[in-house]
Amino acid sequence: MKRLALLFIFLLSGCLAQPTPAPTITISAPMILSAEENPRAPHPGDEKFNREGVIITSVNLIARVDLNPTRIQINPSGSMPSTCGDLRLQVKPPDADYRIFIEAYSLTDPKKKCENVFQQFETNILLGVYSPGRYTIWVNENLIGDFVAY
């Protein structure tokens, strides 16, 4: 009888759930899920022009809740060093620390004679859709603000 009870307990123990290791939380790398078209992005042939700095006087971040999913719009304003400059805003992919760097500069044609008078600019660009996380936005290495993507 003891042998039968022992055999029964042995067989029953095979039906019990085996412990599983606890799941570990994995953090995904930040990335752009879909990019927006940036009319101020660098173009092929830009290397023929002189690259000059710009003075950024303000940058506004606007959450565009009218879009689905919500996206961030950046509205920089400032001035370029000549009247015939062409503004460029290069948005780089986020790095591992969820930082988005935007480089603002102007291009001028070396063959054109331009007055060295500051030209004011005001523009906007729409950022794309990003993977979940808290992102900081930097324009010309200056922290502008942050946003959270869900």
Image (cartoon, rainbow, N blue to C red):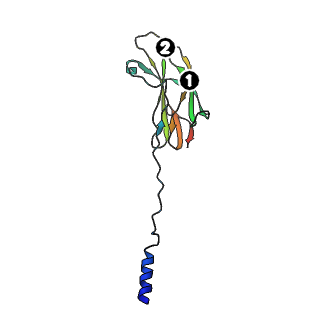
How far from the left and from the top, in percent, is residue 10? 42, 80
What is the x, y in percent for residue 99? Answer: 49, 39
For label 1, count other residues whose C-alpha is less than 10 Å away and answer few (under 14), some (14-19) or many (20+). few
Instruction: Indicate the quadrant containing the N terminus: top left, top right, bottom left or bottom right.
Output: bottom left
Residue at 49% x, 36% y is: 100
Mark in front: 1 vs 2: 1
Q: Using the image, determine if residue 108 lies above or below residue 68.
A: above
Q: Position of residue 98 (x, y in %)?
A: 49, 42
Nearer-N-terminus badge (1/2): 2
107 to 28, vertically: above or below: above
The residue nearer to you, when weighing 117 against 18, is: 18
Q: Which mark is residue 94?
A: none
Which residue was labeled with disc 2? 84
Residue 134 horizontal/vertical position (percent): 54, 43
The answer to whether the residues at label 1 and label 2 have Cβ atoms under 8 Å apart is: no
Task: Name, please, the residue furthest toward the right.
Answer: 66
Camera-side residue of 13 and 46? 13
**Residue type for callout 2:** Cys
Instruction: Identify which residue is drawn at 50% across, 15% down.
Output: 82
| Element carrying mark 1 | loop
Element assignment for label 2: loop
Between the C-alphas of marks 1 and 2, the distance is: 16 Å
**Residue pointed to by mark 1:** 123
The number of numbered discs placed on residues in the rendered structure image is: 2
Q: Answer with left or right where residue 59 lies relative to residue 88.
A: right
Quarter of the image that includes the C terminus: top right
Q: Amino acid at mark 1?
A: Thr
